[in-house]
Image (spheres, rainbow, N blue to C red):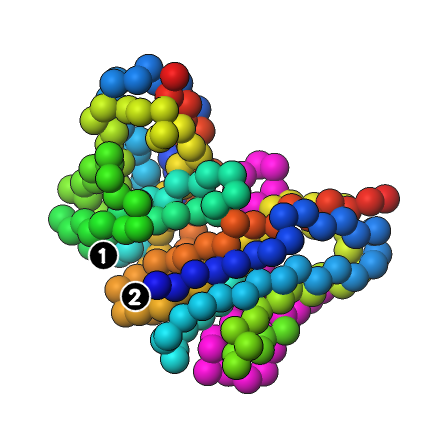
Amino acid sequence: AQTVTQSQPEMSVQEAETVTLSCTYDTSESDYYLFWYKQPPSRQMILVIRQEAYKQQNATENRFSVNFQKAAKSFSLKISDSQLGDAAMYFCAYSWGEYGNKLVFGAGTILRVKS
Amino acid sequence: NAGVTQTPKFRVLKTGQSMTLLCAQDMNHEYMYWYRQDPGMGLRLIHYSVGEGTTAKGEVPDGYNVSRLKKQNFLLGLESAAPSQTSVYFCASSYWASPNTEAFFGQGTRLTVV
């Protein structure tokens, strides 16, 4: 079965600094996709970034980038120049298969940003 | 453009009561999903639908039923609520079958069963 593990229940970062959130996953599939979702206090799930497993290049979206290590089954999220608005719960998620976008989520990491 | 709308936003039920959560999307998406979010466990898939008139079980389907009579609506039913079903429920939808397609989420329903 596919599993996603986020080993950091909570992280803190000073405003304007960089923080990395960890995620590992377990799968026997060769073709799959990985995502980071942000959930602010409003509960709205917001897609931050996605990575296709067959692409070796790490995805980037403005201040957000990933370090995708396929052999190690690791998918970490780096947030540069952290802002107060980045404070939220972050979920790592995995998707595979041909029938829709069924997501398997990690337990989440709460990110606190200090001013 | 409303996106994915869940009704209600909050609800308190007594053990044994029944209720239906409604999810409506206005994006003409084929695929719809129900997840539950519990502390320390992330979101887990309850049921999903790959098109009007279809439903399938996800990871944690026990105690829930679903229906997709209209393409834009996906209903989640609890026939006899239990305290273990206290959770935040999220509906999501996506257009394509490809697993890299972005899923759009509703704002969740906080359900408490006492």
Which quarter of the picture shows residue A32?
Answer: bottom left
Which quarter of the picture shows residue B61?
Answer: top left
**Residue A100 - label:** none
Q: Which residue is drawn at 32% across and 38% down?
A: B23
Vertical position of residue A26 compared to residue B13: above or below: below
Any magenta on residue B78? no
The amino acid pointed to by label 1 is Val
Q: Which residue is drawn at 84% across and 56% down?
A: A16
The amino acid pointed to by label 2 is Ala
**Residue situated in front as seen by the camera: A101 or A75:** A75
Residue A3 as seen in the image, left or right of residue A107: left
Count the marks. 2
Q: Which residue is the site of mark 2?
A: B97
Image coordinates for residue A98, horizontal then vertical, percent: 28, 69
> Magenta residues, as a range?
A38-66
Circles 1, 2 touching at the beta carbon (< 8 Å): yes
Q: Which residue is the site of mark 1?
A: B50
Q: Quadrant of the N terminus of chain A?
A: bottom left
Q: In which quarter of the image is the C terminus of chain A?
A: top right
